Amino acid sequence: MRSSNFRHVELYLTTRGAAADELDRVAVGRCLAGQGDAFGDIVERYHRPLFNVAFRMLHHLQDAEDATQTVWVNAFLRLATYNPKYRFFSWIYRMTVNECLNALKRRKSTVPIDGLDIRAATPASDRTVEAADRVGHALMRLTPDDRAVVVLKHFVSFSYQEIADVMEITVKTVKSRLFTARERLRDALSNPVR
Amino acid sequence: MLSRDQIDLIHRDVDDATTPDERAAAQDLIAQNPEARALAAELRHLDQILARDADRDPPPHLKRAILDAVHTARRPGQKSFRFATPVLGGHMKKKSLILIGAAAAAVFVVAAIVTGFPPGSNQAGTIGGDPTIPGVEQAARYRGRPMTESDVTLQNPEVQALFQNDEIVRLVQSDLFRQAMQNDNFRQVMASDAYRQLMASDSYRQLVASDSYRELMASDSYRQLLASDSYRQLMASDSYRQLMASDAYRQVQGMEAYRQLQAELGRAATPEAMRALESNALYRELMSVDAFRELQSMDAWRQIQSMDAYRQVASMDAFRQVQAMDAFRQIQSMDAFRQIQSMDAYRQIASMDAFRQIQSMDAFRQIQSMDAFRQLQGAEVFQQAARSAVLSDALMRSAVAIQD
């Protein structure tokens, strides 16, 4: 997808590639050795893309902030369990997607309305989203699992395999979800519901 | 009706996740099957819509909130954390664009050099400036005394010799040239000592005499890049000037690893291609270089990367095409190119407000591509005449007199 190429390149250089992996590995090692500023390095590199994943999954500014913060606290507490033979970005994105899916489950019990986040769609207080945008609303009409695949593919530029690794599903399932989600997304964008 | 496999193939093609054979098959299918064509178009349209949904900046307090929460949540017995504020000051994010940014700056450096500044002095028809060229004597007539209007007439043999070249005459008679010569900045650059030093350097002569230089100058992509508003805005920025003056930038620029990786970045038009770079030892090598890290930490560098103009330039197809040009890479690998970059004279010119301002002149951009202009620039009488509006007018009147 060339139209968003610059974002792809930026994300790639920020968080992926052999050098980024090496930076992660070293930072994690330093962090486990008790050097707190090393964890700050990791947060610095990933907090923006993770916040954007959370925002697109949840379509709610405050919830995205909360989810991002929760992910980092959990990452810190579980850092000793991280296996460095796997790539750090897969690990941290997996935690983020899972946290968002959990947040959506919690939200569902209090805000049941056809998969659409009513708080995000109703900008009436300081807890509202920053913009009731067309794409955001369309994304919210997807199932959470499908939305996660779309977000990771289109906004984080993950390959099918990387999405499979993050979501712990097969590549075949990734493609199936993605292709289905795109069809729904096209419909949602053609027939927006406000 | 498309089969499931065909739908899968089109999706993967749009995602750049096909092998070359699959891509060819997908393109055939799209070309021959209207339903496939429609699906591909819809998917690309969808991607364009999603691509317009820009990333949000996280709330400014988020990083601090995360680190405070982590600090609070640390396990009993764990060593106390002390987060270094400078680490969180925002520079890491900017580091993400370092390679592309460095490549962009390389284009700009080449642009600054090859778009007419400094001019070539080894062109036929010049009457001074290069004592090493047989048959061309150093013109020293005006040294030691100010040139006057009476020196810039057809009675002056050097002016006569200059105007024996019809192309030069036509140039001097042109409105474009008049516009340029009436510009104080233009004349200031022409008359600067740094400009003259640069013009006299072997490195510059080698550069402009190379096939790569000519090829780059002739490329549409390069011209598009130089003609863009974004490029002009970038050239006019203080940050760019600071960057050009930095030792770190010049060191990175001189690294073979950087040049090779930059060429690969120029060809990496897809996310998959970018991913292929992850196994690249060159990238790792660059990241371990002090100068590279120093470059990342420069305010000027970060400011350039945050400029919309910079981002627009870096995302231009023309920019990518220039990066991928063999001629561009060859120029970067030339010793002469690196020597020019290390010259104080070049750095002085690149940092001149006047130089940056004339780059945005339409008249300058047009005449700079003319051979006649480069020939004229090599002439001592022109260099002297360029020092004042009065003498410039006299030179132009002499050219008009030829026609009369």
Image (spheres, coloured by chain):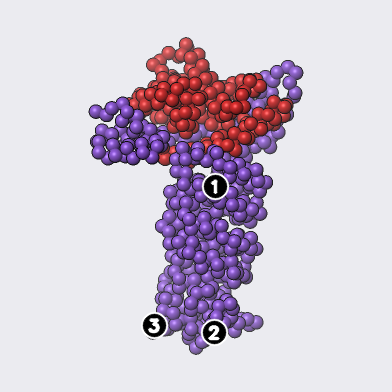
Chain (red)? A
The mark lying in front, picked from 3 and 1, is 1
The colour applied to the residues of chain B in this rendering is purple
- Check disc 3 and give the amino acid type: Gln
User: Label 2 near label 3: C-beta < 8 Å?
Assistant: no
Q: In the picture provided, is B361 more to the left or to the right than B287?
A: left
Which residue does the image show at 48% across and 81% down from the upper left?
Answer: B162
Task: Please identify the quarter of the rendering in which residue B141 is found.
Answer: bottom right
Asked whether residue B309 is in view, the answer is no
Where disc 1 sits, the SS reads helix
Where disc 3 sits, the SS reads helix
N-terminal-most mark, 2 or 1: 2
Query: Where's residue B352, x and y in %?
Result: 59, 62
Q: Nearer the viewer, residue B303 or B108?
A: B108
In the rendered structure, the residue with mark 3 lies on which chain?
B
Q: Which residue is mark 1?
A: B261
N-terminal-most mark, 3 or 1: 1
Q: Which residue is mark 2?
A: B151
Give the Cα separation between the discs numbered 3 and 2: 19 Å
Query: Where's residue A49, x and y in %?
Result: 53, 31
Task: Please identify the quarter of the rendering in which residue A117 is found.
Answer: top left
User: Which quarter shows the C terminus of chain A?
Assistant: top left
Q: Nearer the viewer, residue B27 or B86?
A: B27
Q: Nearer the viewer, residue B220 or B187?
A: B220
Judge the density around disc 1: few (<14), some (14-19), many (≥20) Cα neighbours within 10 Å.
Answer: many
Q: Which residue is mark 3?
A: B403
Judge the density around disc 3: few (<14), some (14-19), many (≥20) Cα neighbours within 10 Å.
Answer: few
Q: In the picture provided, is B59 more to the left or to the right than B39?
A: right
